Image (cartoon, grey):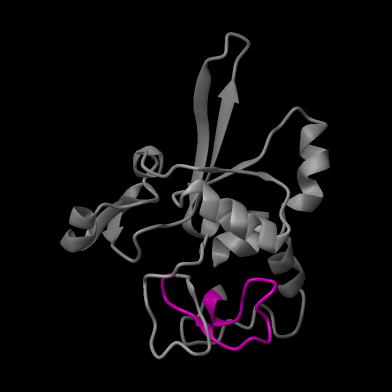
C-alpha cells in the first residue's frame, strides 16, 4: 500500500523532472498486463515496467525467495533483518552515460522513502499528525488506494488491501499492492 501512496505523488512532478533530463520509472514484479490495468484504474501516467520472471527485484534486495522467507531472515536495507513480507519498498537511481552504460548510483529502503511523500509532510504539521495509532502503528492503519476510501476493508501487515468482505488478512492478493 505504501508504494501506491507514493505513486499518487508522482504525476504532478513528472514535468519538473523531465525538464532536468530525469526520467521516472516504477518497477513491479507483477505481469505487465496486471500492471497496466491497475495503472489505468489509478489514473497514473508515469512509466511502469514489469520485472516479472527476472532477478531485478532480488538483485536489489526488495523481493525474497521462498527459501529466504522460510529462514526468517533476509538482507534488506543494508542489513540482515527479520522477514516481514515477500516484497519490500525501495527507491533506486541509475545514471546512463553518453556511451549508454548504466550505473546504479543510489538506493534507499524502508522508511527512507517517506522523503518522497508530500502528504506526510502536510500531516506532520497538523495537531493529529499522521494518526497512525494502531494496530500496526504505520500508514497501513489508515491509507487506502485513492479509489478505496470509504469502501471499508483494511490493509494487512504486508501492505495489501483486503476488501471488506475478506474474513481474515491474506498475503495473497490479486491486486497490485505496490
Residue displayed at 73% across by 67% down: 119
Residue displayed at 75% across by 27% down: 21
Dominant SS of magenta comes to loop
Picture layout, residue 48 above or below residue 155: above
Is 128 on the left-hand or right-hand side of 142? right
Q: Where is residue 166 in the image (x, y as percent from the top left)?
A: 45, 87
Q: Does the magenta stretch include residue 160?
A: no
Picture layout, residue 166 above or below residue 14: below
Quarter of the image with the N terminus in it? bottom right
Is 151 on the left-hand or right-hand side of 62? right
Is 85 on the left-hand or right-hand side of 37? left
Q: Give the range drawn in magenta.
A: 140-158
**Viewer-closest of 147 and 59:** 147
As drawn, the residue found furthest toward the top would be: 99
Residue 112, quarter of the rendered image: bottom right
**Viewer-closest of 107 and 50:** 50
Q: Where is residue 141 in the image (x, y as percent from the top left)?
A: 54, 82
Q: Where is residue 99 in the image (x, y as percent from the top left)?
A: 58, 8
Q: Is residue 149 magenta?
A: yes
Does residue 117 show up? no
Is 52 on the left-hand or right-hand side of 32? left
Q: Where is residue 154 in the image (x, y as percent from the top left)?
A: 52, 84
Residue displayed at 46% across by 52% down: 30
**Viewer-closest of 32 and 102:** 32
**Viewer-closest of 81 and 140:** 140
| Count of numbered labels shown in the rendering | 0
Residue 96, quarter of the rendered image: top right
Picture layout, residue 113 above or below residue 100: below
Does residue 93 show up? yes
Residue displayed at 73% across by 74% down: 123
Amino acid at each position: 500500500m505504501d508504494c501506491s501512496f507514493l505513486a499518487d505523488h508522482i504525476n504532478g512532478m513528472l514535468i519538473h523532472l523531465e525538464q532536468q533530463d530525469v526520467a521516472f520509472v516504477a518497477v513491479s514484479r507483477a505481469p505487465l498486463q496486471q500492471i497496466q490495468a491497475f495503472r489505468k484504474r489509478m489514473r497514473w501516467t508515469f512509466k511502469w515496467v514489469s520485472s516479472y520472471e527476472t532477478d531485478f527485484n532480488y538483485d536489489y534486495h526488495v523481493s525474497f525467495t521462498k527459501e529466504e522467507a522460510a529462514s526468517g531472515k533476509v538482507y534488506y536495507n543494508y542489513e540482515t533483518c527479520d522477514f516481514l513480507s515477500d516484497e519490500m519498498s525501495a527507491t533506486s537511481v541509475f545514471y546512463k552515460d553518453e556511451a549508454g552504460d548504466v550505473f546504479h548510483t543510489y538506493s534507499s529502503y524502508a522508511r527512507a522513502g517517506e522523503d518522497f511523500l508530500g502528504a506526510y509532510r502536510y500531516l506532520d504539521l497538523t495537531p493529529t499528525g499522521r494518526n497512525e495509532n494502531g494496530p500496526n502503528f504505520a500508514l497501513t492503519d489508515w491509507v487506502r488506494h485513492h479509489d478505496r476510501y470509504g469502501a471499508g476493508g483494511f490493509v494487512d501487515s504486508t501492505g495489501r488491501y483486503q476488501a471488506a468482505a475478506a474474513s481474515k488478512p491474506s498475503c495473497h492478493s490479486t491486486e497490485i499492492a505496490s
